[in-house]
């Protein structure tokens, strides 16, 4: 396949560049793909559609996003030092040569030697930054979808995923799987044709991103306006039932917590079959008065599910 057309307008980690945002909004980028597939922790099909439809403003960069972009600048050279390979073309805009709405922004291209032509690239470098934690056994599904899309758009057969986890750098590789790429492309094109081109929203879901997007699209009410929801009576019943179940679950949780705490007393851990099941540890929180700047530290204990903590690592 002919290599993807490239552009290099970004300098450094400025991901609020209006030209880049406009270009990205006219197609599907790699970070959109997991949301369209319904596997993104941060976005949903509805929130992606609302963004493409111009109903949502691009999110303001958070402190974590800014830190991540600056940290990425150090990962490319570190990856090169670790692997003996070379990285070039940071933050390159790429467009599929046959499908103009298939786009991605590449953190870098990987070469065997310095000063190589793009046609000699071995693959793409995708950089992630996160808090310290357990290393991945494999690339998580939502990031794997992003990598598959990058291979599709660029025509390359490999993605190196460099994960900066605190002060540790982990490197994983993904190779082209054409069957998986074809599946992703079919889902993306169906979303583009049915929803983006027609302006027809996809079905809503319970994703936090969907609820946030809906609240941003309609931030205010119109006084005196009412709409009939007769056809949604069953949905209203479900909502009410879920609220009641949620309240009952909270009450059960508090009662169970009280019983566990009463047994633990001053113990740090509770054991089941000799293994740590819960922890009841002291923590501290420091708060600062916005008016005078005075700080106050409070001590408290927190009951945590040790099994759930192990699963999340």
Image: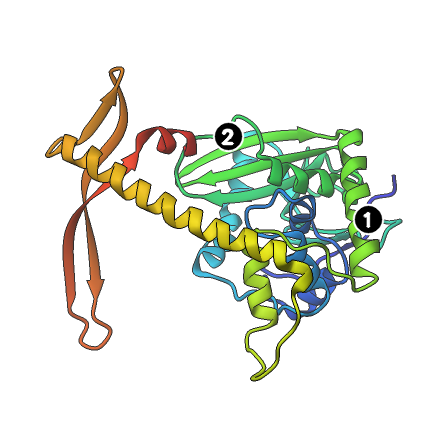
Identify whether 191 is placed above or below 174: below
Residue at image coords 53%, 54%: 239
- Residue 278: x %, y % from top left: 26, 30
Spatial CA distance of label 2 from label 1 is 31 Å
Q: Which mark is residue 136?
A: 2
Residue at the limit of the structure toward the left, as seen here: 266
Secondary element at tag 2: loop
Residue at image coords 66%, 42%: 146
- Residue 312: x %, y % from top left: 42, 34
- Residue 306: x %, y % from top left: 31, 30
Quarter holding the C terminus is top left
Residue 101 visible to the viewer: no
Q: Which residue is mark 1?
A: 190
From the viewer's perspective, is 96 left or right of 261? right
Mark earlier in primary sequence (2, 1): 2
Which is nearer the eye, 164 or 62?
A: 62
Residue 226 visible to the viewer: yes
Residue at image coords 58%, 84%: 224
Marks 1 and 2: in contact by CB < 8 Å?
no
- Residue 142: x %, y % from top left: 61, 40
Which is nearer the eye, 204 or 233?
A: 233
- The local crowd at label 2, few if under 14, some if 14 to 19, many if 20 or more residues have their Cα within 10 Å, is few
Q: Which mark is residue 272?
A: none
Quarter holding the N terminus is top right
């Amino acid at each position: 396949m002919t290599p993807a057309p490239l552009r290099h307008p970004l300098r450094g980690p400025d991901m609020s560049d209006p030209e880049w945002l406009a270009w990205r909004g006219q197609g599907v980028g790699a970070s959109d793909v997991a949301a369209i597939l319904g596997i993104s922790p941060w976005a949903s099909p509805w929130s992606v559609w609302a963004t493409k439809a111009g109903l949502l403003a691009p999110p303001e960069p958070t402190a974590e996003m800014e830190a991540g972009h600056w940290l990425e600048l150090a990962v490319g050279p570190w990856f090169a030092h670790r692997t003996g390979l070379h990285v070039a073309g940071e933050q390159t805009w790429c467009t599929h040569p046959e499908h103009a709405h298939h786009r991605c922004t590449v953190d870098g291209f990987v070469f065997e030697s310095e000063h190589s032509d793009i046609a000699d690239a071995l693959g793409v470098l995708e950089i992630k930054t996160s808090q310290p934690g357990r290393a991945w056994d494999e690339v998580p599904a939502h990031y794997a979808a992003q990598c598959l899309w990058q291979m599709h758009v660029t025509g390359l057969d490999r993605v190196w995923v460099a994960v900066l986890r605190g002060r540790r750098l982990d490197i994983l590789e993904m190779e082209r799987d054409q069957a998986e790429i074809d599946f992703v492309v079919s889902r993306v094109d169906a979303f583009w044709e049915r929803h983006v081109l027609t302006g027809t929203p996809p079905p809503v879901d319970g994703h936090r991103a969907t609820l946030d997007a809906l609240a941003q699209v309609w931030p205010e009410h119109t006084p005196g306006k009412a709409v009939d929801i007769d056809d949604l009576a069953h949905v209203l019943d479900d909502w009410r039932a879920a609220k009641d179940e949620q309240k009952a679950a909270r009450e059960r949780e508090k009662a169970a917590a009280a019983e566990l705490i009463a047994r633990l007393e001053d113990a740090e851990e509770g054991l089941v079959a000799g293994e740590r099941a819960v922890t009841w540890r002291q923590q501290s929180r420091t708060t600062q008065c916005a008016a005078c700047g005075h700080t106050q530290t409070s001590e408290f204990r927190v009951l945590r599910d040790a099994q759930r903590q192990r699963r999340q690592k």
